[in-house]
Image (cartoon, helix red, strand yellow):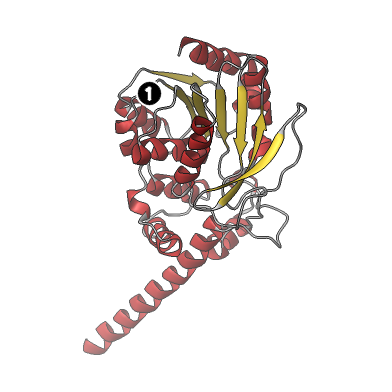
Amino acid sequence: MKLFFKKTLRILILLFIILNVIAFFHAYKFTHFSQSITERTKSPEKLSAFEKIKIVLTGVNNPKPKGTKLPTQKFETFTLKSNKEIECWSIKKESSKGTIILCHGYSGEKSMMLDKSDIFIKNGYSTLLIDFMGSGNSEGNQTTIGYMEAEQVKTAYDYLKNKGEKNVYLFGTSMGAVAIMKCINDYKISPKGIIIECPFGSMYQTVCARFDRLKAPTFPMAGILLFWGGVQNSFWGFDHNPTEYAKNIACPTLLLYGENDKSVNKDEIDAIFKNITGKKKLNVYKNTGHENYLIKNKTEWTKNTTDFIFEN
């Protein structure tokens, strides 16, 4: 009996070590883009069973996001020094009503925000598009899914305020929305208003969602992965909680969500919306997932965002 328990204990210890090694590599790939890989792993819905098993064991291919196009309007490129150096585009509108800072999502970069920028410019606003650290032409290959990026939002906001801009709005999608929420929570900035699309409720929930999409069990791997991701990036991932950040958001807020989102569930959105303390509005788009809302909802999205900005 004693020998049996010893063997069982050894097996459990070995299994624990293997799970931690797998989680360590997953966490690194999740938070560090690769300069050498050019092809991103397909979405879980398009993967075979074998490919899903391989990903669970080895992690995803995560190439560094690179810009695909330039603005059609006259623009200025410059770099801001934050906790990392970030590259920005400034597109100025003559007789501008204000400036909107656009913040991209995970594995995105600033050129992916140009379609939204074009609509804001058409309605009389200047825009400032930023590459978060690790993306586009900004420094490094690291991403912290909105945690350190919050300081970069603050840097862009301060840049505009120091230039004399009084009407600063913030727009963010997914990770960009989370970075905005954490920025307001941590640095107490007071934008004229914010538009946030599909922010996750907590870092743990978004990690679990990735495992769910692979149809892999979340326990205990999601927690172990989050632990190692925090260790590798010098923060406690379990405290990265936009639902809590929302309690310190008192500025006018427009929250947008797609009802078929498999990365963020409606309960997360409802909890965030409930906690926002200021003037707020929630719009839910039908037949829409975790994607660019303009593809399926351009007319509705344009009206929602335009009305919000004009009213605030």
Q: 288 or 282: nearer the eye?
A: 282
Quadrant for the N terminus, please.
bottom left
Q: Residue at x 63, y 25 (%)?
A: 116
Q: Is residue 126 left or right of residue 250?
A: right
Foreground of the two, 101 or 255: 101
> SS at mark 1?
loop
* Residue at the image position 56 percent from the left and 14 percent from the top: 306
Residue 50 locus on image (x, y percent): 62, 59
Question: If the image is split into quadrants, where does the C terminus sit?
Answer: top left
Question: Is residue 70 shown left or right of residue 65?
Answer: right
Specify the quadrant of the image occupied by residue 302. top right
Instruction: Please indicate whether residue 291 sits to the left or right of residue 12 in the image.
Output: right
Question: Residue 260: where, in percent of width, then height?
Answer: 52, 30
Categorize mark 1 by other alpha carbons within 10 Å: few (<14), some (14-19), many (20+).
some
- Type of amino acid at the residue the image marks with label 1: Cys
The residue at which mark 1 appears reads as 251
